[in-house]
Image (tube, rainbow, N blue to C red):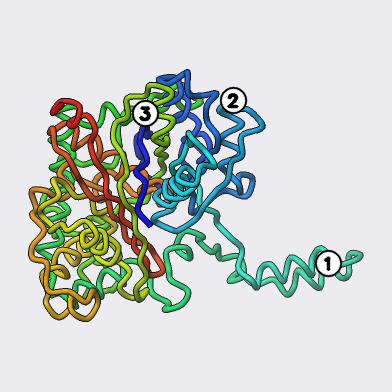
Amino acid sequence: MEFEPIYVVDGARTPFLRARNAPGPFSAADLAVQAGRMLLARHPALEHRIDEVIIGCASPSADEVNIARVIALRLGLAERIPAWTVMRNCASGMQALDSAIANLQRGRAEVVLAGGVDALSRAPVLFSDAMVKWLSHWYAAKGVGQRLATLRRLRPAQLAPVIGLLKGLTDPVVGLSMGQTAENLAHRFGIDRTAMDRYAARSHRRVLEARTRAAFDAETVALVSSDGRIHAEDDGVRDDSSEERLAKLRPVFDKPWGNVTAGNSSQVTDGAALLLLASERAVERLGLAPLGRITDSQWAGLSPERMGLGPVQAATPILERHGLGLNELDLWEINEAFAAQVLACQAAWEDPDYCESALGTPAWGRLDDARLNVDGGAIAIGHPVGASGARIVLHLLHALAERNLSRGMASICIGGGQGGAMLVENLKRTEVAR
């Protein structure tokens, strides 16, 4: 079945705010609502045309389980508009876009508000199973005697908290953290610490260079917290990041011999990214001037131990369908979960054995660094898991428009061993060419 292109009318994201070992100033719904309000304010005629709201979220809070519905109602959208939440780990925001695409292609909707959000700084701190069992006995105890007996069975170790985020970032099937899967790829493709730190420093440098050109201004809307503070920029970007400073950091996931550190990994972050998607019929009927369009998408599965290669597995079938080489696309976004993971994707496409065994193709060659993550990525900007898939699609379209380029690929690795990719086209350039 031929893919019917779906149009990206516009999009907005919040600044990505780094988690600092305490709950951040915004809940996940707060983040999405502030981004959504500014986006809808730019398109007031579309607010009453929205047929559906689809939001990706990997870690919704207990009172925002179907966070899409919370967001829709708090945005003031009509109660008749259905809203639902999707979860595909790191690609939840991209999955929301793909779910919207499916309904737009089938004619079930003409305009959809879709994207992703997470407030990872507010990930829950949990009781252990032992503590929960103790509490059940405590609440069942009757009278002073039973309660005293229950208190005597309480042990300090039972009070140790379980960090929900750490459990969420560990694969339950293979028992590896996401960082350990990056170490696996570094070992497989011979990626050393120097290469990882060089790439990480480049991510910060490219974000800073992009800021000087106001490259993020069109996609980012400032946040205002309850104390009146304005959060206008991604706050994890460091102007002092360098290979020398990064080399001083200790490994986090594979102590003491590993090479993946906090500095060459994506940051734990809070943020939201929302896009307005429309069918071709809606674009024509409503006289819209879209930013671009999504012309293909693909999902792939692979071993959880090598989850970081998901972009290779997902993007390659798209390249084959469209008869494209790696560097025949103008720009690429590969979400920077880890420096080792992005570098491993480049190495995998160059590796004849990997391409033959995993893709059934000859080697694809080297993906040009000058086309890849040209304005930096999640190592510097941050990775609010539910939002990143939507952010890279939105930024890729803006990056193409800024450079008057045509096509690009947004791709992302997914915890659990999956990958997602979307091929996009910049329509602003098409209009100029005409």
- Which disc is residue 147 wearing? 1
**Which badge, 1 or 2, is on the more N-terminal residue?**
2
The residue nearer to you, when weighing 91 against 156, is 91
Residue displayed at 78% across by 71% down: 150
Q: Position of residue 128 (x, y in %)?
A: 60, 68
Report helix, strand or loop for mark 3: strand
376 or 224: which is nearer to us?
376
- Check disc 2 and report the residue beneath it: 76
Would residue 144 be visible to someone looking at this image?
Answer: yes
- In the drawing, does residue 88 fall left or right of residue 407? right
Q: Amino acid at mark 3?
A: His
Q: Residue furthest right?
A: 143
The residue identified by callout 3 is 231
Question: Element at badge 1?
Answer: helix
Q: How many marks?
A: 3
317 in relation to 204, above or below: below
Residue that appears at 28% across and 73% down: 254
